[in-house]
Amino acid sequence: MMQQWFKDAKLGIFIHWGIYAVNGIAESWSFYHDGISYEDYMKQCEGFTAKNYDPKAWAKLFKSIGARYSVLTTKHHDGVALWDTKTNDLSVVKKTPAARDLVKPWVEAMREQGLKVGLYYSHLDWSHPDYASIYREDERKNLDKLVRNRYTHPSGEEDFEAWERFLKFHREQLKELMTEFNPVDLLWFDGDWEKSSDQWRMPELREFLHSLNREVVLNSRMWNHGDYRTPEQGIPIVRPEGPWEFCVTVNDSWGYQHDDKNYKSVRQLVRMFAECIGMGGNMLLDIGPMEDGTIDPEQEKRLLGLGEWINKHEEAIFETDAGLPLGHFYGPSTLSKDKKTLYLFCFDRPYDDIGVKGIRNKIKKASVVGTDIELNHRNMGGAPWLNIPGILWINVQEESLDKNCTVIKLEFEEELDLYRGTGQNIEVN
Ligand code: GLC
């Protein structure tokens, strides 16, 4: 069920941690696409030590930068569980030198810092012997055109009993997660696309999960039987309907890859984050720890940079909703819950004034968030007799500018009153 905490959370930290960090290759996809043999991929188990794993330090870091929740990959498409599953032997507990449950201490550490706990779980499992047992229904009609993948498709006849066994295993793993780490605040699913909603029995799955915990928030990678959308890597242009969360990597990879130095800058992260909250969404920023549990200093630096900006601008971020619709101001904005304060996010350096259109309210005060600076402003033009406001020009001087993104605070006496028209002829003067 959607929860208010999620809508108010704004920032979450996504963690892709698994054996793929050993060689520093793509999580699961590297063997699926034959970049490495399955056997060699699994050999990474031998090098996965988690020897410097310090989830308490992770939690402190996330908390300090303003994140309100975090999501950890408990099992990616490769099928390697990070917790001590009783359903099979494919876990870091049984197959790697780490030899212990890594989810449990993580959950405890997050809770200690007051962060909500999100568990990523891949429905599909390219290691499970019963998984590649049936086709998705719509594939059966086009078998001749289908590019078959051995991890996904049956090699011979379909085996429906095997699929039943797989579903049982899938439910059992989820039950383990939901009971052992109860209460899980969020289940972050992935990998629904290889079988249909009917084959996964998604509505039944939703009920099952709710029978274990009514409150759990579910993302929509359950053929849309979840609670919110998850646009990924490509930032939305149009505001998605309903609650949503943009997941994005700090460089180009979900997991740790030694060679990937294509990092987003702090300023770019700040901008993306402001875009998300301006459209009422959250940002789930992904990092990929190394096999030993170290967070790469380059990744940490960016998290801290984003956090510094968030901490300075807290009031414009938390306890706010989406701001102005497009067209009023050339940048994102947020609105306080009482609708009496508007926050404008300025990405670029203004020449002198910045303009905001369509505001009917009288401005009580204009200021710069995180400073004592008050700003001069004036309203020019408009057709007051038709209740069409002019342009509000706010004068922003060099000394007001934040190095990453300046936030202007506009305070009104009353709730924001917006003009949304197309203009009008003046018939009576
Ligand atoms: C994609 C990828 C997967 C990654 C996920 C995160 O679905 O398949 O590797 O974990 O995005 O959103």
Image (cartoon, helix red, strand yellow):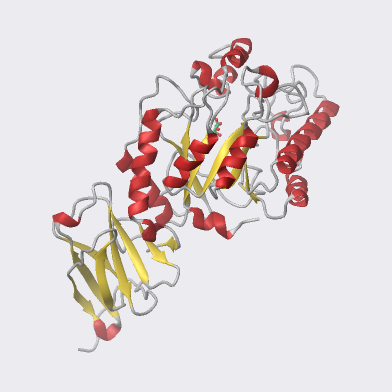
Give the vertical position of 262 relative to 259 (above or below).
below
Q: Is residue 325 visible?
A: no
Left or right: residue 69 versus residue 38 is left
* Percent x, y of residue 45: 61, 16
Left or right: residue 358 versus residue 149 is left
Q: Residue at x 56, y 14 (%)?
A: 47
Give the vertical position of 398 relative to 288 (above or below).
below
Q: Residue at x 53, y 47 (%)?
A: 113
Q: Quadrant of residue 381?
A: bottom left
Q: Residue at x 38, y 57 (%)?
A: 314
Give the vertical position of 324 relative to 286 (above or below).
below
Q: Quadrant of the C terminus?
A: bottom left
Left or right: residue 219 versus residue 371 is right
Q: Residue at x 31, y 72 (%)?
A: 411
* Percent x, y of residue 223: 65, 44
Give the vertical position of 98 relative to 317 (above or below).
above
Q: Quadrant of ligand 1?
A: top right
Residue lying at the far right in this picture: please name it.
161
Q: Quadrant of the N terminus?
A: bottom right
* Towards the viewer: 125 or 388: 125
* Percent x, y of residue 171: 77, 38
Q: Is residue 385 visible?
A: yes
Label tally: 0
Q: Quadrant of residue 97?
A: top right
* Towards the viewer: 146 or 191: 191
